[in-house]
Amino acid sequence: MSSASVDRFVLPAHTPPALPPGLRSHLWLTLIAVALGQFMVGLDGSVVSIVNPEIGRDLNASNAGLQWVTNAYLLAVAATLILGGKLGDRFGRRVIYITGVAGFVAASIAIGLSRTIEGVIFFRVVQGVFGALIMPNTLGLLWDVFPRKKLGVAVGVWAMVSSASVPLGPIVGGLLVENVTWQSVFWINGLIGAFALVASALALPRSKNPKRGQGFDIPGVLLLALGLAVLVFGVVNGGTWGWAAGGTVGCMVGGLAVLLFFGWYETRVRHPLVPMRLLRSRTLTSGTLVTAINVFVLLGTIFFVLLYLQNVRGYTPVEAGWRMMPLSVASIVASPLGATLTERFGARLTLPLGMLLEAGASFGLLGLDVDSSYAALWPSFTALGLGVGMVTASGGAVVGSVPVKDAGVAGGLLTTALQMGGALGGSVLVSLIGSRVGSGLVGELTSAGVPGPVASGLAGAKDSVALGVWPVSAHMTVQVKAAVIEGSGHAFINGVHTAASVAGVLCVVGAVVAVTGVRPSASAATSD
């Protein structure tokens, strides 16, 4: 049977390099080195969601600026991930990985030292570029070191760290911002990175692709980065500019046009950045789409739920972070379980199962109200964490569905989809909340008892209401202030329900794509 028909947890056949006698016991030190880098990159994708308010107050930043603190990082990672994998293949995964960790730490320290929001955004981009050198080379390093019988365990630990790092962000960020400063959220990467660098220097092998002498597709790198950047820029700004505005439509159409041209160009070069033949793998294309939906829903939900917990319910960053704990615990539990189920039954089971769990989590948030108890939240957090862990653990099977020689590029595609989903999740779902708030705010204020002229005058406060901040002022009477709070709360919750509904529908679509697009497992195929 060809490798293209396999969807199980397939790991490329390999012969690990012979380690020096003194390093043969350092297999698990290699895993620690790789896991620390992966954890650091994943953590910084979500940690800012809870420290953004502090950054905004300290640096006088606008809401748009704060959105870019998150999106600039995710966009930079997404646009350069495949390049990071290619550089690892050509110059050695060890040297590129260590360069990525060192650069990531330096950029993190620079963020903490920045005194303008523009400086923070710039170094977030730099941080993202170095993060893109880390992520695509982690699995390759494990494959280079671990013997086949231990590789499954190592990849299971890697998947657990990957899926746990994002939901742990709000908890870590909340503890640091409340007890130290917002800068410490980035400076802690110095400590994590130092351990990763020491472990890397001791344990990581020198490895290169045997075909490293082949040409390097520089035009392909530039076209892919440009297309992704322009497309995501349009989507990120859609909520501010308007989805039908010329700038939004122009960026989205322009980005798609560049990506289509990139695809055409890649079919005509000898050594393409992304071999287009990979797209003929139904399992890879379906798994890539599901991966994007998975992280879109995860980061988008974390973003607006933290707005609700902090701004609407008034929890401190630490209190809000701890209330996200069921999400973190569930994802940690689900990752090894998902890896075991994938190895036994194939990704055709775990991918749709994960998507359906996330759909249930999203639809469960439709019962949320302004004064809901925590009992309305933790079941959805748990289901979301279980779903995320299941989908993340299926990544090895998705990559294993293509020939071994293409596994590196396939992993880059999958990780690019992950980062693209993350970059779009918070922006799109918060934009949906803003659109719903903008269309219904005046009506909700009026229904709550705010006089018509006052309600109309507060229409311009839709952006703050979309963030869970009510437009009350000292000169309002007690009755009007109470009515503004009530009406604003209803408008915000309506927006949350819209975002949750869209997330739930996307997850159902993802489940259908997984069932119809992922090929049957090897065992099932053999029995047919």
Image (spheres, helix red, strand yellow):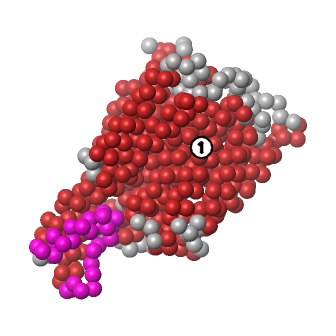
Q: Is residue 454 visible?
A: yes
Q: Is residue 487 above or below residue 419?
A: below
Q: Residues within 10 Å of mark 1 (few under 14, many from 20)?
A: many
User: How many numbered marks, from 0 up?
Assistant: 1
* Camera-side residue of 515 and 111: 111
**Identity of the residue drawn at 23% across and 64% down:** 491
Q: Is residue 471 left or right of residue 330?
A: left
Q: Quadrant of the N terminus?
A: top right
The stretch drawn in magenta includes residue 184: no
In what element is the residue under mark 1? helix
**Residue 121's spot in the image, x, y percent?**
52, 58
- Was residue 453 drawn as part of the magenta stretch in this picture? yes
Q: Left or right? Give the position of 119 relative to 150.
A: left
Position of residue 504 measured from the top left corner of the image (x, y, whole percent): 32, 46
Q: Position of residue 290 (x, y in %)?
A: 42, 36
Name the spot of residue 96 as percent of width and height, x first. Answer: 70, 40
The residue that label 1 is drawn on is 132
As drawn, 117 above or below 395:
below
Q: Quadrant of residue 493?
A: bottom left
Picture quarter with the C terminus: top left
Residue type beneath disc 1: Ala
Is residue 395 at least partly visible in the picture? no
At x 72%, y 45%, the residue is: 98
**Which residue: 21% across, 79% down?**
482
- Name the foreground residue: 77 vs 380: 77
Question: Magenta segment range?
Answer: 452-477
Nearer to me, 87 or 18: 87
Seen as rendered, the residue at the extreme right is: 21
